[in-house]
Amino acid sequence: MTESKDQVAGLLLAAGGGRRLGGRPKALLPHRGRPLVEHAAGVLRAGGCTRVHVVLGAQAEVVRERTSLPGCVLVDNPEWEEGMGSSLRAGLASLAGTGVRAVLVSLVDQPGIGPEAVGRVLAAYQDAGSLVSAAYEGVRGHPVLFGAAHWTAIAATATGDRGARAYLREHEEVITLVECGDIARPYDIDTEQDLVHLE
């Protein structure tokens, strides 16, 4: 029997310092009249995640002051400079003891991925053993959904900027791929040239 989608939390990784953007925290980049982190958290909610945890890092205090993230659990990652892996570990740790059975992970710097893609990945959730990933023309991307049965092993292998990549590669055969190329664009906001994607 498929479990309730309410048991899946959204986890937004928003700690990046924007090294190639002149050191501007990605969470604070303006998009559609508000900070990118607000937009990304809203996408998770609109896609069906009733509980959302947001991992902050670069200029975390400034991000807290300048953004409105009502109902979100804000998680500080003091080791954010180590890369995405540390933020993923901090986010997973923040969900311990909440009763959540799975987590849907998205990145703050991918505004081309909207609620439709989140909802599609969420719909593939079965239970705590689920591993689900959005795919773009068959290539794995974000968002990704990890059942709680995988969290300990993912946290143990999440280092540098790789996040859960190594774990997912090792478990390729059990990942449910959900094609999202028709409804989302998986570009990243990494450089000044990428800012053209922000509105």
Image: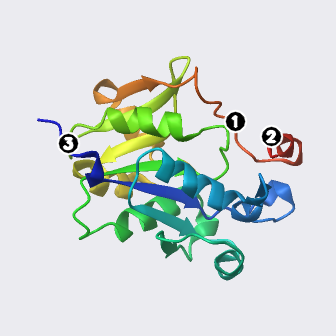
Question: Is 96 drawn above or below residue 144 in the view shown?
Answer: below
Compute the Cα span from label 3 to label 1: 29 Å
Question: Where residue 34 appears, x then y in whole percent?
Answer: 74, 61
Which amino acid is tagged 2? His
**Residue count near mark 3 (Cα–Cα under 10 Å), binned few <14, some 14–19, many ≥20:** many
Viewer-nearest residue: 163 or 57:
57
Question: Where residue 51 appears, x then y in whole percent?
Answer: 38, 61
In the picture, the disc for residue 146 is: none
Compute the Cα span from label 2 to label 3: 35 Å
First-in-chain label (2 vs 3) = 3
Which residue is depicted at the point 58% across and 39% down? 114
Q: Which residue is mark 2?
A: 197
Is residue 160 visible in the rendered image? The answer is no
Give the mark toward the camera: 2 or 1. Answer: 2
Which amino acid is tagged 1? Tyr
Q: Which residue is mark 1?
A: 187
Q: Which residue is mark 3?
A: 127
CB atoms at circles 2 and 1 under 8 Å apart? yes
